[in-house]
Image (cartoon, rainbow, N blue to C red):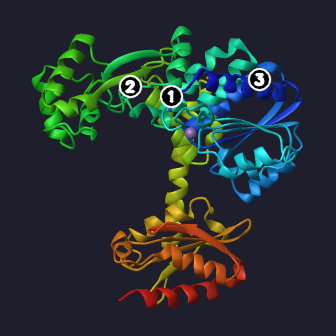
Amino acid sequence: MPTTSGDLKRMEEDLREAAEIINGADSVLIVSHIDADGISAAAIADTTLDRMGIEHSVRFETKLTAQNIGEINSSEEDAVWVCDLGSGYLSEFRRGGMVVTDHHVPDPRWRRRQTTLEDFNQIVHINPHCYGMDGSYETCGAGMTYVLSKTLDDGNTDLAFLAIVGAVGDFQDSHSNGLVGFNREILKDAVIMGDVEIVEDLRMFGRDTRPVNTFLQYSTEPRIPGLSENPYGCEKFLDSLGVRKDDGRWPSWNGLEPGERDVVREAVLDRLSESDLEAALGEVYTLPRFPVGSGLRDAKEFATALNSCGRYDDAGTGLRICKGDADAKELAENNRANHRRNISTAMGFVRDNHLIRERRFIQYFDAGPNIKETVVGIVTGMVLNSDLVHRRIPTFGFAEAEDGLKVSRRTDKAMADRGLDLSVVMNTAANLVGGYGGGHSVAAGATIPPEKKKEFLDIVEDLVSSMVD
Ligand SMILES: [Mn+2]
């Protein structure tokens, strides 16, 4: 369904209404998603409010839950601006002064209620689905956040590049090997501002920071015959084309001399079939204001840096990267290194203190307060893949959490393939002891009352024994 002028008019009306809410607020709570799109969106909203001099704070969430929806409903700020989240939960919000700029599929109940009840809540919802656009590739959460920012102040077009990072982070450029639809309008703003350059090139990942040999070696979509997953083949290939190492290291794709890059590109394309050729080529987006080799000069690499922050519970540092804090990228890398250190310390703790306990059908460790609940899942996975346990037996890790005892479970994929669905086991056992759980077939977590650990394990053992043949 193409976007009509009526759709765009409706979007403008919604944007005006949303702008009124923000303009009328003395304080705003920004709630956003922890992925690249969400972090970019938060940076746009945050910068917009900085410039308006409106008091505000930013909260990042992995998803909306009954708990954080409750907190949004009772928050004291005059307005709440939810970015890259919220559309699926519109009917759960119970407060005035709400603006949602998102691209996920809207909550169907909300529409119904909206037409039958006038008085239930006041949300201004800005979402491509409402304007005849496809939210999976025509615009993203950061894109919707950006158009509101621009409505609030025309001068905010210098934030358009962040909406491009968000779109690329959500793989919206994959649909047509480049950004299309409403994203294209935003891209125009970013290009006019000199913040983004559109480049026609190979679309493989890592143009700016990967040495060209691994840039080629890691290409999977499409696979390059003789180069993908062939380190030796890549070296030989580059050698034969006369590309030279610099100080013992291959230059990055962008670090090649332009003429040299053309030669390598042609040689790569020669190896591809017609259809793979189409998949390999397209638009990529350079952010010329960021230094070469910074990992932020290519929009896809920028988005990857943000995703990595989000994944390690460090979205705040991602926000600083978006806002141009020169030290934030390094800080993010240090945090990542710390995180890896925490994990290896935790792993050593399990090993050195002989924490593994074996039962007939399951094995587990209880780290008490000594391993953070945020990493106990990762540690449980490493334990399963270590020599500390039997690989073929489901492994559970316990760690103290604020709201109870956190349990993580990891299973060999072969077990899951044999039909041992431990997410069901976890849910059932957690519910039976008054906790709650979730997850999928190879990995899952649950939280249970601490005094119910033994009972929980007995139930799990019982269920697992009945499932394995
Ligand atoms: Mn998104």
Disc on res. 35: none
Distance between mark 2 and mark 3 Cα atoms: 39 Å
Tell us which disc is closer to us: 1 or 2.
1
Q: Which quarter of the picture shows residue 202?
A: top left
The one nearer the camera, 247 or 385, is 385
Q: Amino acid at mark 3?
A: Arg
| Above or below for 461 versus 78 | below
Tell us which disc is closer to us: 1 or 3.
1
The one nearer the camera, 40 or 99, is 99
Q: Earlier in the sequence, mark 2 or mark 3?
A: 3
Q: Amino acid at mark 2?
A: Asp
| Quarter of the image where ligand 1 sits | top right
Do labels 1 and 2 touch, CB within 8 Å? no
* Residue bearing mark 2: 208
* Residue bearing mark 1: 2
Using residue 243 as the reference point, say whether residue 74 is left or right of it: right
Label 2 within 8 A of ligand 1 by Cβ? no
Instruction: From the top left corner, tell me how far across and down residue 98 is, in percent.
Output: 80, 38
Instruction: From the top left corner, tell me how far across and down residue 405 is, in percent.
Output: 67, 73
Q: What residue sits 12% from the left and 32% below the top? A: 236
* Quarter that holds the C terminus: bottom left
Q: Amino acid at mark 1?
A: Pro
* Residue bearing mark 3: 16
Other residues around mark 2 within 10 Å, as few (<14) / some (14–19) / many (≥20): many
Q: Is residue 173 visible?
A: yes
Q: Earlier in the sequence, mark 1 or mark 2?
A: 1
